[in-house]
Image: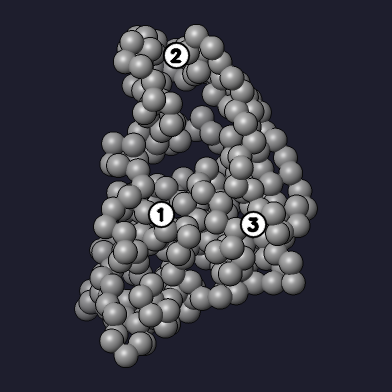
């Protein structure tokens, strides 16, 4: 595991105490790992860093986000490369519109997209990933440590990011709630927000396998209204998901898992191969000066 300073340094100046909003500094253990983040407020709130490098900065949230079983399933599915087309497009848009600096992944999950961007940009950027799922954040931090990526992760709500006003060059919002006001608060003037959501044909094949009537996805209702839309792009493909275990992992990482009748889920579980459309809508917004 690499020393925290290799990737925490770039994020540390931007971090703010989630309780009193003052800047935070790091105290460290003798081995260079772990330690704590201490705020500069009168009460000096303290937040312990794990050996993996992540920290819990959501004191008002005792839990939330994806459970461990969902995190494991999504990591397995995404790690198999089925959504690599989405990652490539995201990297290209980040490179073209943000380029580097401090980039926030709001709702980072297990870090598949955060890590991909950090890997592509290298020393040009420091990534800060936030998610309410402790299991997801821990998984993301461990993966970043194994690759020595410039990525820092913390448990936090996308509606209450523990960051200073105007500190970020860009924000990524990938299959997570779009908290426009909060994203504008933490972005510099002229900063870019990249929102990624499901296109209308996303996972139609999966839905055909479990439902009698299938509908296309509706446009998400939480898109920004006070920012300037500067680019939009839809990426579509058809994939063949192989193996019952991988199909199950895909199913578990979708909202359909929680509202599908048992009989339909059992029908899906018997499949060894699933052909489905995938579709991703990318929208790039700019914060008004």
State the SS at label 1: strand
- How many numbered marks are there? 3
Q: Are marks 2 and 3 in contact (CB under 8 Å)?
A: no
Percent x, y for residue 247?
Answer: 40, 21
Percent x, y for residue 110?
Answer: 40, 47
Lower sequence index among marks 2 and 3: 3
As drawn, 280 above or below 3: above
Q: Is residue 267 visible?
A: yes
The residue at 38%/72% (across/down) is 18
Provide the residue designation for mark 3. 193
Percent x, y for residue 287?
Answer: 70, 64
The residue at 39%/25% (across/down) is 259
Q: Which mark is residue 235?
A: none
Q: Residue 111 vs residue 185: left or right?
A: left
C-alpha separation, residue under disc 2 versus residue under disc 3: 35 Å
Provide the residue designation for mark 2. 210
Q: How is the image coloured?
A: one colour
Q: Is residue 94 visible?
A: no
Q: Are marks 1 and 3 in contact (CB under 8 Å)?
A: no
Provide the residue designation for mark 1. 131
Lower sequence index among marks 1 and 2: 1
The residue at 23%/77% (across/down) is 29
Lower sequence index among marks 1 and 3: 1
State the SS at label 3: strand
């Amino acid at each position: 595991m690499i020393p925290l300073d290799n990737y925490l340094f770039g994020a540390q100046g931007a971090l703010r105490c989630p309780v009193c909003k003052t800047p935070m500094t790091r105290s460290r253990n003798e081995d260079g790992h772990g330690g704590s983040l201490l705020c500069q407020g009168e009460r000096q709130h303290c937040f312990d860093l794990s050996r993996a490098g992540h920290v819990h900065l959501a004191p008002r949230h005792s839990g939330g986000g994806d459970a461990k079983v969902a995190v494991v399933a999504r990591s397995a599915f995404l790690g198999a490369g089925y959504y690599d087309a989405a990652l490539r497009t995201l990297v290209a848009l980040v490179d073209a519109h943000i380029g580097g600096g401090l980039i926030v992944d709001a709702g980072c999950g297990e870090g598949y997209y955060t890590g991909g961007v950090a890997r592509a940009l290298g020393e040009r950027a420091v990534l800060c990933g936030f998610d309410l799922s402790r299991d997801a954040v821990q998984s993301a931090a461990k993966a970043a440590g194994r690759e020595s990526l410039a990525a820092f992760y913390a448990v936090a709500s996308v509606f209450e990011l523990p960051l200073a006003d105007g500190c970020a060059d860009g924000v990524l919002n990938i299959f997570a709630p779009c908290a426009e006001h909060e994203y504008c608060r933490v972005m510099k003037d002229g900063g870019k927000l990249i929102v990624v959501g499901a296109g209308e044909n996303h996972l139609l094949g999966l839905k055909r396998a479990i439902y009698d009537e299938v509908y296309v996805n509706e446009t998400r209702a939480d898109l920004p209204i006070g920012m300037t839309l500067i680019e939009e792009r839809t990426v579509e493909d058809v994939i063949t998901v192989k193996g019952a275990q991988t199909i199950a992992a895909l199913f578990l990482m979708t909202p359909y898992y929680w509202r599908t009748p048992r009989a339909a889920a059992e029908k899906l579980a018997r499949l060894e191969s699933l052909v489905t459309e995938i579709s991703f809508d990318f929208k790039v917004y700019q914060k008004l000066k």
